[in-house]
Amino acid sequence: MENKLCGRIAEIINKLKTTAAGAEEGRIHIDFKDDAAKQRWEEFYMNEIPNEDSEQLWTRVDGIGTRLMMILALAEEQFEVNLDIVNSVIQFLHYQVEIRQRFRPIDAKNNIARLEEQIRRLIPNIGDKLAQRDIAKKSNAHKYGIEDFNRALKNLSGDNTIAITYGEKNSKTVTRINP
């Protein structure tokens, strides 16, 4: 299997060398295959990448995308980027930003602020719900103490970030109501 993959990569590299040797200035020019692919990339660039990115989650995403489109096109032995490649790359870039969001360090001055941010991350979208006991488990509330955990919930509830509802047997559900 490994030898087969190495052989395949060598074939592609040889094809690239041959194509580059016949190209102007010895370089392969890779462009969009059609207007649909180009328009989709421009739409993503202009409308989906935020102008203001205070958390720097979108930093260098466009550069990663352009390089990735070229790599995928070459891996498919194409010298043009088609719409499928553009859409695949855009989907990957959204995933990349989501991972950056999920794993960025929490910058907090105290335990309550840290717990508040952990709770926000556990229920990131408006309408997301989670049982309060699950939030306590997933945020490791036991490390901070029940008093700090309850204070964090109270603070988030007080600024209308979350709503706490009571269910059967004194169970509590926490719902995200504002960003």
Image (cartoon, helix red, strand yellow):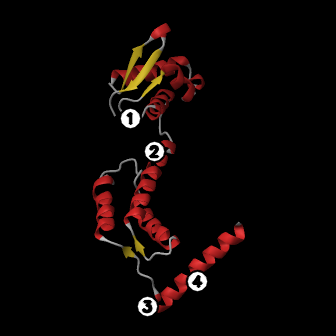
Residue holding disc 1:
125
Residue in view at x 42 percent, y 54 percent: 91
Query: CB under 8 Å between callouts 2 and 1?
Result: no
Q: Which residue is mark 4?
A: 14
Counting residues from the start of the chain, the first of labels 4 and 2 encountered is 4
2 or 1: tag closer to the N-terminus:
2
Q: Secondary structure at mark 3?
A: helix
User: Looking at the image, which is closer to me, 38 or 109?
Assistant: 38
Which label's residue is closer to the chain start, 4 or 3? Answer: 4
Considering the numbered disc 2 on the image, is that residue within a helix, a strand or a loop? Answer: helix
Q: Amino acid at mark 3?
A: Glu
Residue 25, numbered label = 3
**Quick check: marks 4 and 3 in contact, CB under 8 Å?**
no
Which residue type carries mark 4? Asn
The answer for how far apart the CA atoms under marks 4 and 3 are is: 18 Å
Residue 67 image offset from top left, x and y in percent: 45, 68
Up-down relation of residue 63 to residue 99 (above or below): below
How far apart marks 2 and 1 lie (CA) works out to: 13 Å
| Percent position of residue 44, x then y | 32, 58
